[in-house]
Image (cartoon, grey):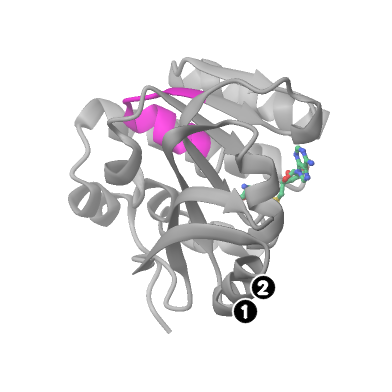
Amino acid sequence: MTAPLTEAEFAVLAAVSRETRDRLVAYVALLAKWNAKINLVGPATLGDVWRRHILDSAQIHDRVAAAEVLVDLGSGAGLPGLILAILGGPRVHLIESDARKCAFLHEAARVTGTAVTIHNKRIEAVPPFEADVVTARALAPLAQLLDHAVRFLKPAGKCVFLKGARQADELTEARKSWHMRVTERPSLSDPSGVILEVESPTRER
Ligand SMILES: C[S@@+](CC[C@H](N)C(=O)[O-])C[C@H]1O[C@@H](n2cnc3c(N)ncnc32)[C@H](O)[C@@H]1O
């Protein structure tokens, strides 16, 4: 079994500044505190929180940092959207339907001093706006993610999805109804995980 990733090891891997590191430490402390009361992440994952949640989110930062507007669908505890906002770059929108999770997101944004827009709504109920990047983790199968994402994605934009072991089947299924360019990279944090970048998704007619 791999030993849990420490905060110091994460800081070296991700090359983050002292200030960013302090903000991420504040986020992790708040996540642990709130997770005792509301189910934000699987309790067992907190033992390796720097790998399972912080590195997992931060590993896509280089793929999104140049964007102006990023929308994170089904953010939950802000994974990956709030972590990407802490790391800096785009203006980040977090969409999350659960009011208690949104209360956490507001508090986490406050304690980490991070400017984000939080939409406490179902994705389908958020009036579309244009984003350069759409992110999501653990929300829905790929075909359904694309249904949500295309409402926000600029024509030249891209989706960056953190996917698990079922991604190959999801991709096969999605290709039945979508044309798209897909780039796959292995996850740094999860041996069975994949980062899927999807460009130019258009529905089959
Ligand atoms: C499994 S959790 C994943 C949360 C987070 N992205 C993560 O990886 O830890 C899925 C989240 O999406 C939210 N969600 C599901 N369907 C949604 C919808 N249609 N609109 C907005 N939020 C949704 C749920 O409330 C939940 O917080």
Segment colored magenta: 81-92
Residue 67 x, y percent position in the rendering: 34, 29
* Residue closer to the observer: 1 or 15: 15
Relative height, residue 178 to residue 86 (above, below): below
Magenta run includes residue 61: no
Q: Which residue is mark 2?
A: 173
Relative height, residue 78 to residue 197 (above, below): above
Residue at the extreme front of the image, as rendered: 205
Nearest-to-viewer mark from 2 and 1: 2
Label 1: which secondary element: helix
Disc 1 residue type (three-letter) = Asp
Asked whether residue 76 appears in the rendered view, the answer is: no
Asked whether residue 130 appears in the rendered view, the answer is: yes
Q: Residue at x 50, y 43 (%)?
A: 80
Q: Quadrant of the N terminus?
A: bottom left
Mark 2 neighbour density, 10 Å: few (under 14) some (14–19) many (20 or more): some
Residue 205 x, y percent position in the rendering: 69, 55
- The answer as to whether callout 1 falls within 8 Å of ligand 1 is no
Horizontal side, residue 163 vs residue 65: left or right: right
Disc 2 residue type (three-letter) = Glu
Residue 92 x, y percent position in the rendering: 49, 24
* Residue closer to the observer: 121 or 6: 121
Horizontal side, residue 136 vs residue 205: left or right: left
The circle on residue 169 is 1
Label tally: 2
Q: CA distance from mark 2 to mark 1?
A: 6 Å
Mark 1 neighbour density, 10 Å: few (under 14) some (14–19) many (20 or more): few
Horizontal side, residue 12 vs residue 45: left or right: left
Asked if the residues shown at circle 2 and circle 1 are in contact, with their CB atoms under 8 angstroms apart, the answer is: yes
Relative height, residue 58 to residue 178 (above, below): above
